[in-house]
Image: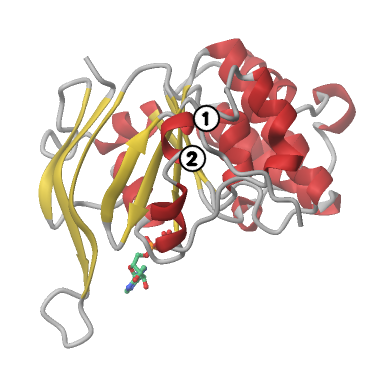
Amino acid sequence: MPSISIRNVSYIYNEGLPFEKRALDDVSLDIGEGEFIALVGHTGSGKSTLVQHLNGLMEPTEGEIFYDGVDYRKKGNIATLRQKVGLVFQYPEYQLFEETIAKDIAYGPKNLGLSDEEVEERVRRAMGKVGLDYDEKGEQSPFALSGGQKRRVAIAGILAMEPEVLVLDEPTAGLDPRGSREILEEIRGIFESTGTTIVLVSHSMEEVARLASRVIVMDRGRVHMDGTPREIFAREKELRAIGLGVPQVRRTMTDLVEKGFDIKEDCITVDEA
Ligand code: ADP
């Protein structure tokens, strides 16, 4: 059974007003346990709106969403859904607020009614997953950290909830190339070590090529393509038509070959320029 089933979901902002906007238009999708999905699409294609439906933060205007067969919204049990599906927003570091890193990360698990020891253990584990040492950094202020490190603290706050599905909305936005690479490696590490289902919103086809096993391409609120990276990148013309490029092959060739891609067969053109 898929973890999440999205059935004919539409979402309209400002419904009934002159400037109403259909941001999702009859989206149906199944997200399976243990998948690493990249959600891509031009700005405004509906990615953020869609991911906010996955943990019940937004309610469909039409359609239904099931988690392990249960519609938690209808059951009035959104808190349970939020534990199962962790959502890391864009620029999550803006939501840091506690005086120490450890306290900030502990905020979510503390509200689960766990013992102090269990909370601390979760904070340690979560910090470890994003490459931060609890003993070294736990008592420091999150506000003294670099942008990339603040973002790791924010991601750790979600990881400490130990979600079954981790959804990240543009986790590398605004970071320099090194910071981006490090965060992506940590996400890959989380996936490989825990098998957590991952949905990664990205505007970078290179990120997608490196990490995902399935790519969902959104366009104007609809699912435009859904397939393996190999299948999606072979449809270069269609991708360009909706404002997306294929990966810069020269930079990602090694990664793609390592992932078992047959570059020639997949018709990914080498940019000689
Ligand atoms: P993406 O994440 O792919 O950039 P969004 O889900 O943010 O796309 O936006 C989808 C569409 O909904 C866009 O046309 C956007 O302008 C519109 N939209 C997003 N948020 C709001 C909002 N709070 N109020 C009105 N329209 C919105």
Quarter of image, res 269: top right
**Is 135 on the left or on the right of 195, as rendered?**
right
Q: Is residue 252 above or below residue 203?
A: above
Return the x and y of residue 249 as percentages of the image width and height.
Answer: 68, 41
Callout 2 secondary element: helix
The amino acid type, in three-letter code, at marker 2 is: Phe
Mark 1 and mark 2: Cα distance apart in space: 12 Å
Please state the quadrant of the image where ligand 1 appears: bottom left
Residue depicted at x 68% and y 37%: 103
Return the x and y of residue 83 as percentages of the image width and height.
Answer: 39, 29
Callout 1 secondary element: loop
Residue labelled 2 has its Cβ within 8 Å of some atom of ligand 1: no
The amino acid type, in three-letter code, at marker 1 is: Ala
Return the x and y of residue 24 as percentages of the image width and height.
Answer: 24, 58
Is residue 141 visible from the viewing direction of this image?
Answer: no
Question: Which residue carries the number 1 mark?
Answer: 212
Q: Name the one closer to the observer, 258 or 211.
A: 258
Residue farthest to the bottom?
A: 18
**Is 124 on the left or on the right of 30, as rendered?**
right
Quarter of image, res 187: top right
Return the x and y of residue 53 as percentages of the image width and height.
Answer: 29, 46
Residue depicted at x 21% and y 52%: 59
Density class for disc 1 (Cα within 10 Å; few <14, some 14-19, many ≥20) is some
**Is 250 on the left or on the right of 85, as rendered?**
right
Q: Name the one closer to the observer, 119 or 62.
A: 62
Q: Nearer the viewer, mark 1 or mark 2?
A: 2
Q: Name the one closer to the observer, 207 or 271.
A: 271
Question: Which residue carries the number 2 mark?
Answer: 233
